[in-house]
Image (cartoon, coloured by chain):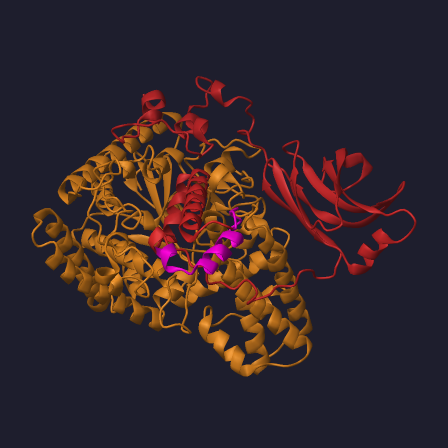
Amino acid sequence: MSIEKGYLGFVLHSHLPYVHHPEKQHCLEEYWFFDALAETYLPLLDLFNKLYAEKIPYKLTISLSPTLTTMLLDDLLQTRFAAYLENKIALGEKELERNRKNPDLLKLSELYKKHYEKCRDSFENTYKRNLIKGFKALEKAGCIEIITTAATHAFLPLYQEFPRVIEAQIHTAVMSYGRVFGKAPRGMWIPELGYFPGLGKYMKQHGIDYSFVAAHGQLFANKKSKYGVYGPVETSSGILAFSRDIPASRAVFSTEDGYPGDQVYRDAEQDIGFDQGFDYIGPYIYDDKIRINTGYKYYRIDTGEKGHVYNPEKAAAKAIAHAENYIYLRSKQVKKLKTLMDRPPIIICPYDSEIFGKWWYEGLIWFEHVIRKAAQSDDFEMSTPSQYIDEFSVNEKVEPIFSSWGNKGYASVWLEGSNDWIYRHIHKASERMKELVARFPNESGLKKRVLDQAAREVLLSQASDWPFIMKTCLSADYAKMRVKRHLYNFNKIYDNLCRNTVNTEWLTRIEKENKIFPDLDYRIFGDRDFS
Amino acid sequence: MTEERLQLLPEDFLRNIAVKEGISFDDTIDKQELIEIILDAIEEDRAEKYSSNNPAMRIKERKFDITLNEQFDFDEDKYPLPEKYNETKIVLLLRDPAWAYAYWDIKESDIEAVKVGAVNGSLLLRVFELEKPEILKSNIIDFFDIPLKINDSSWYINLPNRGVYYKLELLLKRGETEKVLCFSNCILSPSWEVGEMNNIKEMKGTGNDLLLVAGVYDLSESETGTKIPQRIISMIDSEYLE
């Protein structure tokens, strides 16, 4: 690290809830995963590999949630994703024919078809269906640092009164990371940046060195830190907390005053899945009748009128200009900060990975050029929290307050009228799980299988995604069903254990459906120290 | 949900959707009118949900936004959950510096106690504001009561002050007699001001430039940002980075 320069710490948070339905031939919600793979994760890995091959120096942090890594490694989902790509390519063939008389549209059809063919090539040949290998190779090459997050992405502040839940979420995440990556994680992304005073101690006891908090989580603490959000603070437990930089985040996050809202960019809403008749589009949507995004989008963001055909060259040029602007502003920010600090500032820029490609189509071009230009900057270089704390191990002691990156900065996204009903049931299931550990402290064989599955069901019910979808998305039924089904499964196991009966056929079925965390030990919910 | 999709659904199913979604409609209207009412309600809901999200949450929303056609196929009774757990217990959850949420359960025997006797009892939620996280006389800053109905099982509580602890008592009251059914856990209402600061706007020029570079004046993280036609973020830099 050079002390003349500042540091830019990109953190890409990568997460999806566990969606795995072997009991169905196909499942609408699995498209969350497939779309993210095709539009973000495969292109992002390809981009990182391209930059590495060109010897462009870069360093960034990626958090991969245990639920996402489980899905990335799942045979059934890999097979279904391969079929998904074939379907997209087949649609591309039809689109080439449909648009043959319109050169502008035809060019876009070719672009999209090639994109899906490239995805297929990368998925099948480069990564052999295993994207985890791609991430591991990049980490080995020193380009990325992979960190983890809570096991099923629970919003932890709402479990403060249930310490075994927090212990179980973190312990399971660290175990899962160890199984997938063969080592221990140094960093942990707290789901939704949901921090509360004292959370650090749970991470500390599992060897986590650092985490992240919302800017106001640190700035509103009782003690003001010397470096503001441009250096980590040491929490009361000893882990270091890096704060999200608001200006750097907002430039990318906001469609109102950030880059992605530029009218030259592609409109994500206008998709032929919603425009074409069923006779044409039927085989390429869900179940021939549920209209979904197909990825074939021909219009740019504009005033709502159709006919403004998307121009990828113009959009790419604007994305590069926006990358230059971003780097220019970060340079100014670093120059200013260097006059205010006696050590190099680190600007933490955390983004949801799906911004790049899926949410903001040109975001991948933007990100590529940010990395290229950062490599040439005299003012800063890309770095990771690990590198920074290895260099600057002594930091001010400040305990961040309860905070998150959700709307209004606290818990109101995950606790409001549409979703508050879930907590009494999830909390109760968590207490009952603890009770089961006390009653059956040393089980093996079939009874251990039953108890392990009970623990799995409790963990899966706790995903922050379910209350989020209930509050935010129009289609909340799936989220309600998931919470109720996991709790129902848990309660059934609890009742069966009270009666000392086990329905092995049913157990085997739910084990297949919810086959996450294969080495989970139900005793993580117990009182004794399981670390 | 698109009009096309609604057209494909039977009228009875549409009426069930409307009831389930809490949409008011006149029983005499025909299918087309019902579809229009449902579409209006969906659009209103969509706009309200969109406006209540900040940018980070909108990106998260997009993860799950793959179709306009919501599925109404979940049978609410398929995975029943217990209505009560027959225990007397109250849990207090902090939602933000100004609001907390409490849920409780009351044992059947305790509920019966409310009804027994010449004078019917009532339930009360007593909210204690505390200096330290224990209900001791010396710690109590203030308290107030919220009258409850016997069937209530949760409540959102406005927290008057920041930087203090809150704890609840669930009480059975009969005449002048009060019986504590249970206590909640204790929560600390966090500050919503920068440490050792009173007025963010006064920070400029007072040695807190670092906070201004961090965009502290814009911490609400809600959609109040200035529109910038060129889509170039300059609001912070022009003012504070020079």
For this view, does B184 lie left or right of residue A273?
A: right
Q: Is residue A181 visible?
A: no
Furthest toward the front, the residue is: B28
The quadrant of the rendering that contains the C terminus of chain B is top left
The part of the image, by quadrant, that contains residue B41 is top left
Q: Position of residue A233 (x, y in %)?
A: 49, 39
Residue A315 visible in the current orientation: yes
Q: Colour of chain B?
A: red
Q: Is residue B39 magenta?
A: no
Height in image: A273 above or below B94?
below
Residue B209, quarter of picture: top left
How far across and how far down the image is residue B93, in percent?
63, 46
Residue B53, above or below B211 = below
Occupied quadrant, residue A427: bottom right
> Which chain has been coloured orange in this picture?
A
In this picture, which residue range is highlighted in magenta?
B5-27
* Camera-side residue of A166 and B181: B181
Residue A196 appears left or right of A118: right
Horizontal and vertical percent position of residue A16: 40, 57
Out of A374 and A273, give the one closest to the viewer: A273
How many dots with numbers? 0
Q: Residue at x 90, y 40 (%)?
A: B176
